[in-house]
Amino acid sequence: FACDLFGEINRELIKTDPNVVLGIGSVVDAGTASLYLNRGARFVVSPCLVPDVARVCNRRMVAYFPGCGSVTDIGEAHELGCDIVKLFPGSSVGGPDFVKAVKGPMPWVKIMPTGGVDPDEASIAKWFGAGIVAAGMGSKLVTDAAVKAGDWAAIEASVRAAVQAVADFRAKSGMQYAMEFDLETDFPRIFATTALYPESPWAGSMPFRVELDLSTHAA
């Protein structure tokens, strides 16, 4: 079962690299969330807002990042105790302009868009300049061709360039943000986060975050 594989990976990382923060996505029901929380998941991500998942995570004091596509979704997520909301799909719901519009009347909102953030200076500056606290990137950062070819050096170079672009923006703006890198393979899907923002529950102790998307794995 996928959840058992997750548990095995988590146990291995505890021994080999305890600084890695392992989480799970994409979760759409409380039962699945509980399975992974019981195997050590440190955060849960959903493509939509699922109140029951929020409640399960709150009971365990585990971060939950729900997918939100409207101001109503964001408001409901806050009522359910979610600190950071996943703007999904980022480019389809208004992009950076949506972020700016929301943060006008709701400056406390912490938004992490997934979809529409490209690994180049212009895109990073536009999104982070709008006020996001984290960003998700996918196949444009880690290409299918590089993964299939096992060209890890090219992937490393791509990720390093994106990290540098964020660092340069931070230096110019005097702000700190998180950046999420979506390293997509056929199975599983891995997410790693660096440059954590100060409000992060892992700031100062967990420099990286990894999420395994096991939702498509056949049991």
Image (tube, rainbow, N blue to C red):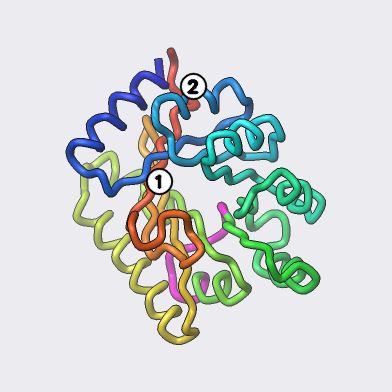
Q: Secondary structure at mark 2?
A: helix
The answer to whether residue 89 is seen in the rendering is: no
User: Label 2 sits on what residue type?
Assistant: Leu
Q: Which residue is mark 1?
A: 191
Q: Where is residue 115? Give x, y as percent.
A: 57, 53
Q: How many circles with numbers are drawn on the protein?
A: 2
Q: Residue at x 60, y 54 (%)?
A: 84
Residue 72: assigned label? none
* Residue 144 figure quarter: top left
Rounded to the nearest whole Å, what is the CA distance between mark 1 and mark 2? 19 Å
Q: Where is residue 138? Give x, y as percent.
A: 45, 50
User: Of the residues under marks 1 and 2, which one precedes in the sequence?
Assistant: 2
Q: Quadrant of the C terminus?
A: top left
Q: Residue at x 22, y 31 (%)?
A: 12
Q: Quadrant of the N terminus?
A: top left
Looking at the picture, tell me which residue is in the foreground, 48 or 90.
48
User: Label 1 sits on what residue type?
Assistant: Phe
Q: Where is residue 119? Give x, y as percent.
A: 43, 64
Vertical position of residue 39 compared to residue 162: above or below: above
Give, as a single range, the part of the protein colored magenta: 114-123
Nearer the camera: disc 1 or disc 2: 2
The answer to whether residue 93 is seen in the rendering is: yes
